[in-house]
Image (spheres, rainbow, N blue to C red):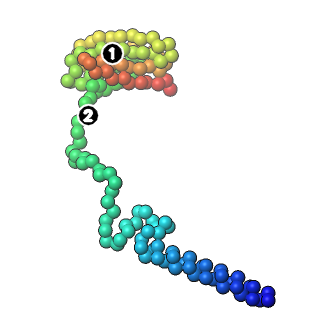
């Protein structure tokens, strides 16, 4: 009697495992298995199609619109700013980051030396309607 009960239990488990295995084999053959790798193509030989196309990038370097060519510290602790050749006049504002004090300069030409604070500051450069901000933090 106990042996018969174990035999029924074992045959039920074996039948359930066999049915589960066959259903998994059907899913794998259809290519719709939940465990399949999404990067793998569904059918061999077909390439993967990207969702978003890549932009066309030119092979040559495009010139950046440079306003400031060179910034250097002078021996006296001032900041020397050299503008690009295309810029003839500019307005420069030095803003102290600690005190928010602003000092403005108007100049024509290609180079200016500016006295700057010892703490961090922002260099605001206005040319016509365009405004460029450069931040210099204290070390």
**C-alpha gap between disc 2 and disc 1:** 21 Å
16 shown above or below 83: below
Question: Which label sits on residue 28?
Answer: none
Which residue does the image show at 42% across and 15% down from the upper left? 95
Residue 6 position, x and y percent, is 74, 85
Residue 84 position, x and y percent, is 24, 25
Q: Quadrant of the N terminus?
A: bottom right
Depth check, front residue: 9 or 126 = 9
Which residue does the image show at 70% across and 82% down from the upper left? 9
Farthest residue to the front: give it. Answer: 1
Which residue does the image show at 35% across and 71% down from the upper left? 43
Which residue does the image show at 27% across and 47% down from the upper left? 55
Q: Would residue 61 be found to the left or right of residue 9 on screen?
A: left
Depth check, front residue: 47 or 16 = 16
47 shown above or below 125: below
Residue 14 appears in view: yes
> In the figure, residue 75 lies in which quadrant?
top left
Residue corresponding to mark 1: 92
Residue 65 position, x and y percent, is 25, 30
User: Mark 2 or mark 1: which comes first in sequence?
Assistant: 2
Residue corresponding to mark 2: 64
Residue 41 position, x and y percent, is 37, 67
Residue 111 appears in view: no
Instruction: Please tell me whether mark 2 sits on a helix, a strand or a loop.
Output: loop
């Amino acid at each position: 009697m106990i042996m018969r009960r174990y035999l029924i239990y074992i045959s039920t488990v074996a039948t359930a495992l066999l049915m589960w295995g066959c259903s998994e084999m059907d899913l794998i053959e259809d290519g719709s298995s939940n465990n399949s790798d999404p990067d793998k193509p569904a059918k061999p030989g077909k390439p993967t199609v990207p969702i978003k196309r890549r932009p066309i990038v030119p092979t040559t370097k495009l010139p950046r619109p440079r306003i400031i060519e060179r910034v250097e510290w002078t021996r006296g602790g001032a900041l020397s700013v050299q503008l690009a050749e295309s810029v003839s006049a500019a307005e420069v504002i030095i803003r102290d980051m600690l005190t928010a004090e602003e000092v403005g300069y108007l100049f024509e030409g290609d180079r200016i030396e500016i006295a700057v604070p010892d703490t961090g500051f922002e260099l605001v450069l206005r040319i016509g309607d365009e405004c460029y901000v450069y931040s210099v933090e204290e070390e």
